[in-house]
Amino acid sequence: MKINKLSIAVLFLSGSVFYAQETRQDTVRKEKKIEGVIIQGNSNKKTETAVLGEQKKAIIQKQAVSAEEISRKGISNVEQGLTKVTGITTVEGRGLFVRGLEERYNYLLINGLGSPSNNPFQKIIALKQFPTDVVGKLNIYKTFNSNLYGDFAGATFDIETLTIDKSFSKVEFSVGFNTLSTFRDNFKVAEGANGIEGYLGLNSRNRRLPDEVRDSRPNGYVFSREQSLSSFKDSWNVDNIKTLPNTSIGFTTVQKMKTGETGSLGLLFSLNQGSKYSYREGENNQFRDNGKQIEASNRLNRKVYEYELESSVLLGLGYKNRGTNINLNAIYLQNSNNIIEDNIGFKNFSVQDIRFFRTNQQDISRFLDLQLTAYQKIGERHQIKAGVSYVMNNYSQPDRKIFELTLPENFNNALISYGGNSFIRQYLDVDGRFYGSAYGEYSVFLGEKGDRKDYPLQLAVGYNGFSDVRKNSYRFIFGNPGAGGSTQAYINIDQPQSVLDSSINSGNLYYNEGSDAYGYLSNIYQFVNAGYANIDYKPNDSWDILLGGRFENDMRIIRFNRIGVSNTESLTPNKNYFLPSLSIKKSLNSKNNLRLSLSKTITRPVLIESMPIEYINPDNSSVVGNKDIENSENYNIDLKWEYFPTNKEMFAVNLFAKRIDKAIERSIANSGNASGLVITFYNAQKADIAGIELEGILNLGRISEALSKFTLGANATFMYSNVERSEKQLELERPDGYTNDQLHKRGLQGAAPYTINADLKYEYKNSQNLSKTFSLVYNVSGSKIFAVGSSGSREYFERPFHQLDFVYQNQLTKNWNVKFGVQNILNSKYRIELGDENYYPVKIDDNYTFVNFYRGTTFNLTVGYTF
């Protein structure tokens, strides 16, 4: 008989597959009938091109940052990586803002499983703690689908840990120089924090509550002379050091082996450790109503010394075999931040009383996430996936020491008085007693493909949820004058411990606990359980319609005691939410998509926003949680056009709008004792948001062939917001003598009117296909309300911060690579300011600064070796 001899060449280029074939006629005497030939190939899903292709195909609005882009832009942690996405910016110490919305509107998944925050002051984990060496891809969902948690208004981030595709090992070392902090003389760190125990975060053990009171209810315990000397393991002293460069070191290994004919088993291990010094100096002021006139109640100059240590470990096991995929991950994150903060100036309108006060604190968090996920494909039509996680999570500020005195002429011989809150030790502990998360989903493809790429109908049903149990404790120990006869002493402010010990020995000073016997403790329980169903209907290859429904039960229990009251109160808000979603994608042709998304979602408060405590700072400010805060309910609409001229280019325009009922906002009010300011939180009646996102990735070879190695990426978000105040907000914001109608219209707290990100890349590949890239990356966001004002003042605004970074990367050989980066080239000043056009007259010498400081410019050099 005659057969055709078929020769096939396959060329893979950045995820695209090209085939060439040649046929020849031949004969053979003995033949076997061949029914067909299936040619299979895999593309690298971590490249920028592959990620762009995935974004093009997805039914919901999903963006991603690939492992390739992470490397090219010199991104060292997840937080930096996410700021390269349209409409996302990072804000000093407060996480990521998406479409100008505060961090409280975001949610975090790790490999599809829910994750708690390891810091009560943030909604999600500080993503700078995730080194990018352990990340395969960062997924960002900007539109809602029912298989995502209902806590969604800005975005849901899903960190996919590194996949086990091929065996390799990598060692990376980085060194950084900051113009403000590196090689700085007289940099202050807590005694012992700069040693090996501090480097590993073990110095927190010496800062725990003393044994005499640790496991008992506060009862005004008075420490004896011997106990006052020996029970507190951490000193009031600080060391003055010359800082070294910032450093980090990481090791990652991936090993893959075959099991059977088609299976594979993989092992992933990654270990990272980093240290960073930072120094900030600037104003720390307060403004209050003083007889229907806005005046500066505080004028302080603040210096902050931070020595931060970050550790991470990832251990992963993966098994693959045709339609089976099982992964076991263990993720450990530890952050230890040793902070010395000095303030000089006046407080509470006492212009002539210039004070000095110091805070010596350690913020330490430990986070361990154990995960098991599985996926099984059954035949061509059925899929099952499931996952479960258990998290051990703790955040504490152990032995936060504060002392205060009149500004001395000589800091080596400063007079201090015992009593009057001159020596305070605070102990905050937020203990995650239990956190568990789980999901499960079954999906089936219905109908017949025919000549099409996909089945016309997919049905999915599933469950996801979590349980989060926290025990919160906030205790105080005071240094008080004893019966020895002397209530004053002269100290060296950096080395006061020996004088304090002497005063204790002579009976002039002792410690006693001043915590309330009941109000020091609170418990918060949160249980979220949801079932959902999705129908994905594709009537033809150009239409994709995804209809989803989610029923979510949200139960929160807050148990607390009021100050001095033994009876425990319980608040048990229990809400059921039905959260529908609809996403429609129309492929106009092979290069153009049109998308429409409609959904309802909710927003849960940050932990501190609902905690029934008053967190006290020495500058007469405090943070007070609102136990009655409610979830917001959000109604979202997006309309987007996308154009993909090539597989590496893209242009998009997205119109979006939101109605947020009971929007949560931060407010600044006068404290109850009329001596400072309180930061607290309220629900607005509603907020309306409308905006446009513009995005483009352009190869400049379109302009000139000489520019073909340059690529320009830019994105911008412009947004309008308007708030209708709730009754409680009207009471807070309305000055005496004004009506509600006389209050100024304002936008949503935390919503930026614009955000802009841009990067210019030059990429060159040599004859060995080794790349060299240069990138300039810029981002900024417009003035946004940091906090709503009160008592005759306007809002406090966070002003634009312009950031420009440069990154150079060179793959020297197949094994060696080097990166050089310059961050914050412009070194703009970070500023929060009181707005103008206040209701009451302003007498503040034309200085509206609430907080300001510089961060300095940082130069980083990273060398990596892969083997």
Image (tube, rainbow, N blue to C red):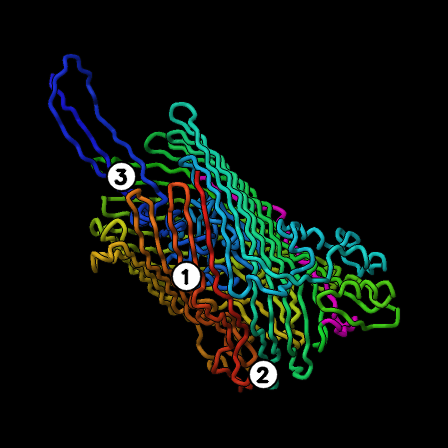
Q: Is residue 792 above or below residue 237?
A: below
Which one is in front in this view, the residue at disc 1 or the one at disc 3?
A: 1
Pick the front one: 550 or 279: 279
Residue 236 locus on image (x, y percent): 73, 62
The part of the image, by quadrant, that contains residue 718 is: bottom left
Q: Which residues are magenta?
A: 412-440
C-alpha span from label 2 to label 1: 39 Å
Q: Is residue 594 visible?
A: no
Which one is in front in this view, the residue at disc 2 or the one at disc 3?
A: 3
Residue 790 locus on image (x, y percent): 55, 77
Please rate how many residues cluster around mark 1, counting C-alpha atoms within 10 Å: few if below 14, some from 14 to 19, many from 20.
Answer: many
Q: Residue at x 28, y 58 (%)?
A: 652
Secondary structure found at label 2: strand
Secondary structure found at label 3: strand
Which one is in front in this view, the residue at disc 2 or the one at disc 1?
A: 1
Pick the front one: 3 or 268: 268
The label number, if any, that marks residue 805 in the structure image: 1
Name the amino acid, label 3. Answer: Phe
Please rate how many residues cluster around mark 3, counting C-alpha atoms within 10 Å: few if below 14, some from 14 to 19, many from 20.
Answer: few
Please rate how many residues cluster around mark 2, counting C-alpha atoms within 10 Å: few if below 14, some from 14 to 19, many from 20.
Answer: many
Secondary structure found at label 1: strand
Residue tagged 2: 295
The label number, if any, that marks residue 12 in the structure image: 3
C-alpha span from label 2 to label 3: 68 Å
Q: Quadrant of the C terminus?
A: top left
Name the amino acid, label 1. Answer: Asp
User: Can you name the residue that lies furthest to the top here?
Assistant: 29
Q: Is residue 416 shown left or right of residue 580?
A: right
The part of the image, by quadrant, that contains residue 851 is: bottom right
